[in-house]
Image (cartoon, grey):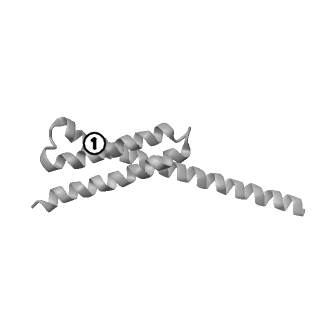
Amino acid sequence: MSPEERQQVEHDTQLAIYRFQADAYRNLRHSVAAAIVIFGLFIGSDAFLGNADGARLWPCLVLLLSAALGVGYFATTNARPRLGMQLLLAGVVTAVIGIALLIVVRYGAG
């Protein structure tokens, strides 16, 4: 194998690995955003159904906000990837805050 062929094979291999990693990270981001949307809508729907009253209303509203941020990620990820990543990060943070609030309301009041 000539040095040029070897260099081309190395370049092709590195490119294939880069594409594989980029696809894997994109799939991970999509999965996280989808989980945020599903969980936020599932728990947050209690606010609209009347099952969340009193102190439980605020965590449900925070989780609805996280679901909206997750939907925003899907809406902007192709056109503006940086904004999409910021929305995903904000969605993850608000989901964690909402889950923590649910735990505090559930177990902290007793």
Image side of residue 81 versus residue 109, left or right:
right
Image quarter of the C terminus? bottom left
Neighbour tally class for label 1: few under 14, some 14-19, many 20 plus, Cα within 10 Å: some
Q: Quadrant of the N terminus?
A: bottom right
For the point 41% across and 44% down, which residue is it?
34
Total count of labels: 1
Position of residue 24 relative to residue 69, above or below, is below
In the rendered structure, the answer to whether residue 41 lies left or right of residue 32 reads left
Residue tagged by mark 1? 42
Above or below, comparing residue 7 to residue 69 in the picture: below
Going by the image, does 83 lie left or right of 42?
Answer: right
Q: Percent position (x, y) of residue 12?
A: 75, 55
Regarding mark 1 in the picture, which secondary structure is present there? helix
Indicate the quadrant where residue 101 lies: bottom left
Instruction: Using the rendered view, name the quadrant where residue 80 is placed.
Output: top right
Residue, far right: 2
| Residue 1 appears in the picture as rendered | no
Residue sitting at x 77%, y 60%? 10
The residue sitting at 15% across, 62% down in the picture is 108
Counting from the top left corner in percent of width and height, residue 45 is at 24, 39
Let me know if residue 45 appears in the view. Answer: yes
**Side of 2 where 107 appears, left or right:** left
Q: What residue type is labelled 1?
A: Phe
Which residue ends up furthest to the left in the rendered image?
110
Q: Residue at x 31, y 45 (%)?
A: 40
